[in-house]
Amino acid sequence: VPEAGAIHSSQKWNNPLVKQYGVKHLPWLLLFANGRNVMSGNPSPADQPNGVGLGATHSLRYPAFGKPRVLALECVPDYPSQVGFGDGMALFRDAESGALQAGRSNVFKLQLETQEVLKRAGYDHDMAVSLQEARRMVQDATPPYGLLLLTTSIGEAAISDLAARARARNSKAICLLCHDGKNVGPLDESIAQLVKRQDLVRAVFQRPLSKSRFETELKTCESVRVNYPKCGLSKETLVQLLRKYMDEL
């Protein structure tokens, strides 16, 4: 404001507000109760103790702040007890005969497909290539993940474990699955029941994954809706601070 210098200047006209109430800059809050000054300062909201205090609020319109962080897991299926192969081999169901056949999983293509969809949808994401790596990333990520995009090849137990770990760190975290039915056959019944309960897993996408199906599923989910945080002290927060301060008098 034009009068800012006159308010807190100590070199031109020394305003009595500076000497009497310790005003240092504008804006500044002077609170009076029963004829006496009970507060003189520039308060900041509790969640921004080092923030700008009084003044205009601004939305941090960056995708990384407005959308949940995503962890994608697309690891090579491994079934050593059934087929005796190591990493890189999986059981595939023949489309015509229905017989299980051992073959190499095209996991690299699926990883690229997942990353492309998340990038086009504007989600900040990390890619885990093994179950052990996914568990570590869910546990250590800062900020915690708000969305998991997992392959069904890891099985129902691992899916439940990762979803529960993510929910423990972020109560709004949701879990989505990707299933390569063309190569591995129908969805396992235990995973289908997990999705049906809707407590840990929200939905299953059939490969190939598309941006339109991914965004359509998230449209009805409140926890992952775009919500840009605000920086500064809004009038609602100021009223709450004043009420709390007056209650403590």
Image (tube, rainbow, N blue to C red):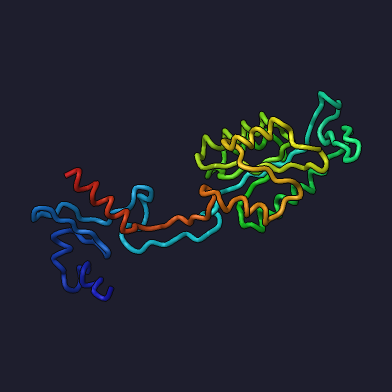
Q: Position of residue 15 (x, y in %)?
A: 16, 68
Left or right side of 230 for 163:
right
Residue most extreme to the left: 35
Left or right side of 245 for 184:
right
Quarter that holds the N terminus: bottom left
Q: Position of residue 164 (x, y in %)?
A: 57, 33
Q: Which residue is found at the position 71% from the left and 54% from the top?
A: 210
Note whether 69 is above or below 136 in the view shown.
Answer: below
Q: How many marks?
A: 0
The residue lying toward the viewer, choosing from 82 and 246, is 82
Residue most extreme to the top: 81
Q: Which residue is found at the position 28% from the left and 54% from the top?
A: 43
Q: Which residue is found at the position 27% from the left and 64% from the top?
A: 27
The residue lying toward the viewer, choosing from 189 and 210, is 189
Among the 4 quarters of the image, the one containing residue 192: top right
Note whether 205 is above or below 200 in the view shown.
Answer: below
Left or right side of 37 for 81:
right
Quarter that holds the C terminus: top left
Residue most extreme to the bottom: 2
Q: Which residue is found at the position 62% from the left and 31% from the top?
A: 161
Left or right side of 248 for 150:
right
Residue 138 visible from this viewpoint: yes
The residue lying toward the viewer, choosing from 123 and 205, is 205
Residue 139 visible from this viewpoint: no
Q: Position of residue 104 (x, y in %)?
A: 86, 38
